[in-house]
Image: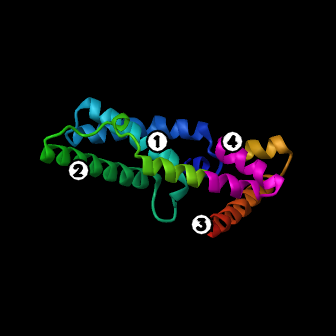
């Protein structure tokens, strides 16, 4: 199931994964001493990380549950560190909304976006279209293949080649 999420961003496979693991993750966190609200919030964070990091799953190194609960363990440790740091400073942990980006980070982000746009514009039309569908529209590779009437392998090859070209172009830019 995780491999389907990783390869094609299959939302149905992710929904099944979520349905299976979310209650188990929350129960694990509750048994570890977290209150219900914290456990629910951390469970949501973990499940989002599973969606984002599905490409890192390697069935040869272990089962899905082992991989998922390694993510849970790390998230729980990070959560405990944030709470400990907040107690040491006497301030509540910062909310995500309270962390306004600095002017420097905004400028750097704007510069990176300009470099990325320039690199994307240097791709061929086929590669650019597939990258936009895959990464900006979050369209699964199978849906792209169907929409463009291409074999799935061709779509995957174009994505891989486009990403390699983008990597080179972005490394060359100042």
Extent of the magenta region: 114-140
Upstream in the sequence, badge 1 or badge 3? 1
Q: Is residue 3 visible?
A: no
Q: Could you say which quadrant of the image residue 92 lies in?
A: top left
Q: How many marks?
A: 4
Tell me the element at label 1.
helix
Look at mark 3 in the image and give the residue it sits on: 174
Colour scheme of the rendered structure: rainbow
Task: Say few, some or many: other residues with alpha carbon within 10 Å of mark 2 (under 14 / 14 to 19 / 20 or more).
Answer: few
**Gap between marks 1 and 3 measured at Cα:** 33 Å
Q: Is residue 61 left or right of residue 172?
A: left
For image coordinates 74% across by 41% down, the residue present is 143
Q: CA distance from mark 2 to mark 1?
A: 20 Å
Q: Are marks 2 and 3 in contact (CB under 8 Å)?
A: no
- Between disc 4 and disc 1, whose residue precedes? 1
On the image, numbered disc 1 is attached to which residue? Answer: 48
Disc 3 on helix, strand or loop?
A: loop
The answer to whether residue 22 is visible is yes
Magenta segment: does it hold 121? Answer: yes
Residue 40, position in %: x, y?
33, 33
Residue 67 disc label: none
Name which of mark 4 and mark 2 comes first in the sequence.
2
Location of mark 4 (residue): 139
- Relative to 42, is 167 on the left or the right? right
Marks 4/2: CA distance? Answer: 36 Å
């Amino acid at each position: 199931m995780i491999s389907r999420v990783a390869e094609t961003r299959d939302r149905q496979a992710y929904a099944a994964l979520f349905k299976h693991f979310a209650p188990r993750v929350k129960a694990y966190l509750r048994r570890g001493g977290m209150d219900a609200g914290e456990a629910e919030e951390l469970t949501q964070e973990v499940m989002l990380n599973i969606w984002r990091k599905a490409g890192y799953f390697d069935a040869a190194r272990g089962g899905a549950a082992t991989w998922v609960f390694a993510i849970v363990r790390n998230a729980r440790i990070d959560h405990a560190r944030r709470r400990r740091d907040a107690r040491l400073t006497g301030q509540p942990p910062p909310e995500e909304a309270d962390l306004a980006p600095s002017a420097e980070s905004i400028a750097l982000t704007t510069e990176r976006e300009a470099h990325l746009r320039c690199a994307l514009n240097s791709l061929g039309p086929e590669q650019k279209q597939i990258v936009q569908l895959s990464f900006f529209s979050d369209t699964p590779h199978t849906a792209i293949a169907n929409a463009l009437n291409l074999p799935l392998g061709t779509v995957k090859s174009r994505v891989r080649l486009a990403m390699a070209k983008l990597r080179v172009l972005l490394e060359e830019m100042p």
